[in-house]
Image (tube, grey):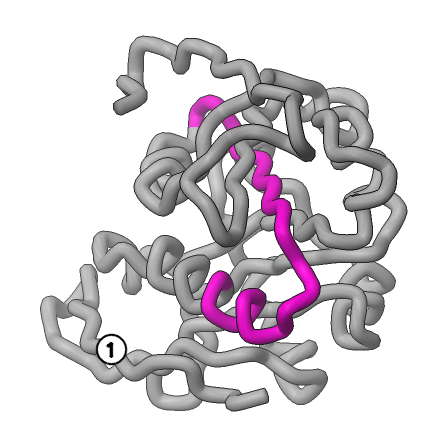
Amino acid sequence: MRKTLANITINNAENKKAYLCKIKVLDKRWKNPLIVLQNNFLVSTVDQNLYIPFTEDEIDEVFSGKGIFIGAVVKDKLVGFFMASFHDQETIELGKASGIPEEELDQLVYIESSIVLPMARGNGLLKKMINECLVVLKKMNRFKHLIATVSPENIPSLKSTTDLGFRVIRLSDIHGHYERYVLYKNLYHNTYNIGSDLAMPQYNMRASLVMP
């Protein structure tokens, strides 16, 4: 798999300078920078409910083949990432609750939490990382269904995912007490049906975001 997926230019929100940013598939060498970025984010963020941190075991599972990390790198520094997981129990249970047919659960990808450093925000990085991930998933030729979960208060992430064709299908509690919108996208078609005849219902978004 090609490690660097795209080269883009971003503007640093702090010093207003332009930098080359590489969108990459992260391998195990990025584990420690990923954990450091996550820990620093958790210390600095005001609303802890916006982000569900990954445990080290979950990170190791992804690097062992149960998902992929896509990262944004500037001058060899990780400035953002998100995780897509598959074949793990959480993804399977989320798929069942969302109406994915039992025989197609192995074709499901869960687009999970993301972090972008303040200096790199305002460049649409999350949208660019997810878009590159979709290209990778199509080339793998193993997946069909995509599900993402986003906090109702995280308007930038909601906009990024819906701009890429995801649609809200329900409101749910994740890990017991994290309220999240569950969004669905078919990897290959602009359809919100699961299987052959189950139509995906749509929920009205809160007043802070108007669905197209």
Q: Identify the residue position indicated by label 1 in the image.
A: 8
Picture residue at 19% right of the left edge, 63% below the top: 14
Instruction: Estimate the x, y position of residue 141 in percent, counting from the top left.
Output: 63, 69
Quarter of the image for the N terminus: give it.
bottom right
107 is within the stretch colored magenta: no
Label 1 SS: strand
Q: Position of residue 23 (x, y in %)?
A: 40, 76
Position of residue 92 relative to residue 10, above or below, is: above
Q: Is residue 88 above or below residue 66?
A: above
Q: Is residue 136 magenta?
A: yes
Front residue of 22 and 39? 22
Screen quadrant of the C terminus: top left
x, y percentage for residue 148?
57, 40
Instruction: Please name the residue shown 66% across and 58% down the image.
Output: 143
- Residues packed near mark 1 inside 10 Å, few (<14), some (14 to 19) or many (20 plus): few
In the drawing, does residue 189 fall left or right of residue 113?
left
Please provide the residue range marked out in magenta.
134-153
In the rendered image, residue 113, in percent from the top left (x then y), is placed at 58, 48
